[in-house]
Amino acid sequence: MSETVPGVVVTGASGRMGQVLVRLVTASPALKLVGALDREGSDWLGRDIGEAMGGAALGVTVSDDPVATIAKAQAVIDFTAPDATVAYAELTAQARAVHVIGTTGFEAEHLAALHAAARHAVMIRAGNMSLGVNLLARLTEKVAAALDAAFDIEVIEAHHRHKVDAPSGTALMLGEAAAKGRGITLSDHSERGRDGQTGPRGEGAIGFSAIRGGDIIGEHSVLFAGEGERIELRHVATDRSLFARGALKAAVWGQDKHPGEYDMFDVLGL
């Protein structure tokens, strides 16, 4: 990292994650908050982000102008929605800033656009930025590699009632890890919906079960079910700030890296 403290823009500033990110960036000695973006029509626009959050002024006004805001940044931390993230990615690439992406729910066309943007700047994208979840993914890959297709794999995830995508980005990350361990592609072996007379489970399928309710921050389990025995790997998040702390770590880590696509395995040295 250079001697100059990198300036950070937080997108989706009025959201749950946006507010957590603003607090942590403000408290960090390694980063400086230089911008806060929110959606067009937000009640927060034109207000100091600190005051909008109910605290002291921070000298950063909430804006819906990503062009001018991102031009000031050395890093953009983005937990928004797929279409918004793709739009931010183009601007972040133009600014040659590090784009840390915690957004989930991408389709193939979104990923293609992100891949193009990453040719010009550092992009760090992960379905989950916590150390524990990334360790869980590595363990999932190793266990899947050690067990044959006689063990059924099910990824079970639970989130708050407001989450709009399923399976979660973390669940898909764990499914990809299991598929990699098995030497298969997740797209060809994914089983995501069961209702009615579905017939028996296909051998080698990687299943997903999603729970939505209340204020659950995030719970993920990977179940390996064989005849007469089960192995279960599990991670429970009790504080949303753990995802934000990983994002800040990624923003600092990416400052001296070459343009390209990275993930939290790279950041954490896993």
Image (spheres, grey):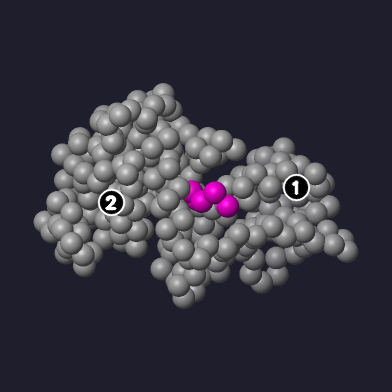
| Numbered label attached to residue 26 | 2
* Percent of width and height locating residue 217: 48, 65
Q: Are marks 1 and 2 in contact (CB under 8 Å)?
A: no
Give the mark nearest the N terminus, 1 or 2: 2
| Numbered label attached to residue 106 | none
Q: Is residue 52 left or right of residue 80?
A: left
The local crowd at label 1, few if under 14, some if 14 to 19, many if 20 or more residues have their Cα within 10 Å, is some
Q: Is residue 224 visible?
A: yes
Element class at badge 1: helix
Residue nearest the observer in this picture, 254 or 212: 254
Most extreme residue toward the bottom is 214
* Percent of width and height locating residue 19: 30, 59
Residues rendered magenta in the picture: 128-132
* Percent of width and height locating residue 184: 70, 40
Residue nearest the observer in this picture, 105 or 142: 142
- List the residue tagged with mark 1: 143
Q: Is residue 203 above or below residue 68?
A: below
